[in-house]
Each structure stands twice: as structure tokens, then as C-alpha cells.
Amino acid sequence: MKNKKTLIVIILVFALVVGGAAVLYNRLGKENAPEQLVTQTPEQTDESKSDENTADESQADDTQTNETEAKIQTPDFVVYDADGNEVRLSDYFGKPIVLNFWASWCGPCQMEMPDFNEKFLALGEEVNFLMVNLTDGSRETVEKASAFVTEKGYSFPVLYDTQSEAATTYGVYSIPTTYFIDSDGYVVTQASGAIDGDTLQRGIDMILPK
């Protein structure tokens, strides 16, 4: 009987330890999850390195120049709307842009789309949301993508990369991929893979006028 009670106590203690470890693991996992938003900064040039050794009175000007150089001018491309009209990314410069590459067959893309639609409905007057569909003509067609968007009831603008110009220009080989572009047409940050609403909002906050 005594051995039986001891065994029960050991089992209970073990269960508590395992349970506590699981809770701790989940909490630490969330706290230490990798940041999906990646800020792009070009490598520092020799000229900018030498500027660091200039006189103090020129440091303010150098700092402003370096901040401008740290931005990446987003390359332009041509895609098409549902009616086949040509659309350029540069047409939307002047307001912040959320540029998302997706396809209807992409599971992670489907996961994040409700958040994109929600943010578009809330911020569509302040931010341009451009959902660029990778329309290869076989696995993904304009008809398939349009039917998917209609079925889900999404309101955000959809553009079709039927010539693969946008995907090639941005080197998009995996989706979803999202770029956050400020009103001057500079890439501020980007995210690879599906993002949640909080991450999407953080990206938007980075491109909204201060």
C-alpha cells in the first residue's frame, strides 16, 4: 500500500513538472518568436565610411544624407487589373503602399487575407493596398483568382501579374511576401511568409506619415 501511494505521488509530481514545462515553453516561444519584419539597408559604401571622419559641423548633413541613402527606392513594374488594363506600381506613389504577393492556391496566403481585408476596410483611404496575384496562366489564372476573391467577399484591390514582371522584379520565389513602401516610393520593411494582424499593423505604422 505504501509503495502504491509513493508511486501515485511520483506520477502526480511528474505530471505537474511536464505541465509546467509546457506552459513555460509556449510562453517563451511566443516571447522569443523571430521578428518577421525585416528592414532593408544597403551596405555602407567607402565614401559614406569616410564621411564619418569629417568635421563635427558637417555631421548633421552627413546624417541626413546617410538616412536617405539607407532607403531603397522600390523598382517599378507593370501588372494588370481584372479588365486587362495596365497598372504601374508608381501610379500609387504619394501614399503609403502595402504590396502583397499571393495566389489563391497558397494556404499561408489564405490565412493572412482576412487581416489584410480588415486593414484595407479600416485604412484604405490612408494606405494603398495592392494585392498582386501571381497569375501564371495554368496553376493560377485571372478567373481562378477572381472567383476566389469574390467567394471570400474581399474588398481590397487585386492586380494580376500575368507576365511575371512584378515577381521577377522583386525576386519573389515564395509567397506570401509583403512589402511596406512609404509615400515617397521607398521600401521601408518587408515580411516573408504569412503575417498576423499585429505584424501587419506594425508594418503599416512604419510607413504612415509621422
Image (tube, grey):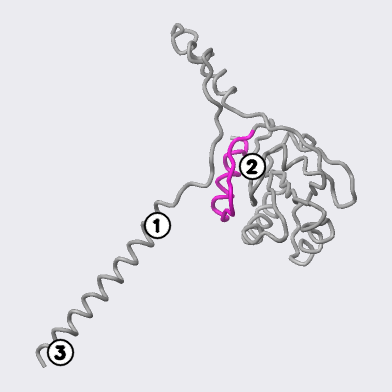
Point out residue 23 in the picture as x, y percentages from the top left corner: 34, 66
Measure the alpha-carbon separation of dots 2 and 1: 26 Å
Q: Residues within 10 Å of mark 1 (few under 14, many from 20)?
A: few
Q: Is residue 19 left or right of residue 209?
A: left
As shown in the figure, which amino acid type bears the numbered disc 3?
A: Lys
Measure the alpha-carbon separation of dots 3 and 1: 37 Å
Between residue 207 and residue 126, name the one nearer to us: 207
Point out residue 27 in the picture as x, y percentages from the top left corner: 37, 60
Q: Residues within 10 Å of mark 3 (few under 14, many from 20)?
A: few
Measure the alpha-carbon separation of dots 3 and 2: 62 Å
Mark 3 touches mark 2? (CB < 8 Å)? no
17 relative to 24, above or below: below
Q: Give the extent of the magenta segment.
A: 187-209
Residue at x-position 54% and y-position 36%: 39
30 relative to 151, above or below: above
Q: Is residue 2 left or right of residue 137?
A: left
Mark 3 touches mark 1? (CB < 8 Å)? no
User: Is label 2 in a helix, a strand or a loop?
Assistant: strand
Q: Is residue 102 left or right of residue 79?
A: left
As shown in the figure, which amino acid type bears the numbered disc 2?
A: Tyr
Between residue 115 and residue 57, name the one nearer to us: 115
Viewer-side label of 3, 1: 3
Question: Mark 3 or mark 1, which has the lower sequence index?
Answer: 3
Disc 1 marks which residue?
29
Mark 2 touches mark 1? (CB < 8 Å)? no
User: Is label 3 in a helix, a strand or a loop?
Assistant: helix
Residue at x-position 71% and y-position 47%: 129
Disc ID at residue 179? 2
Residue at x-position 67% and y-position 59%: 106
As shown in the figure, which amino acid type bears the numbered disc 1?
A: Gly
Disc 3 marks which residue?
4
Residue 142 lies in magenta, yes or no? no
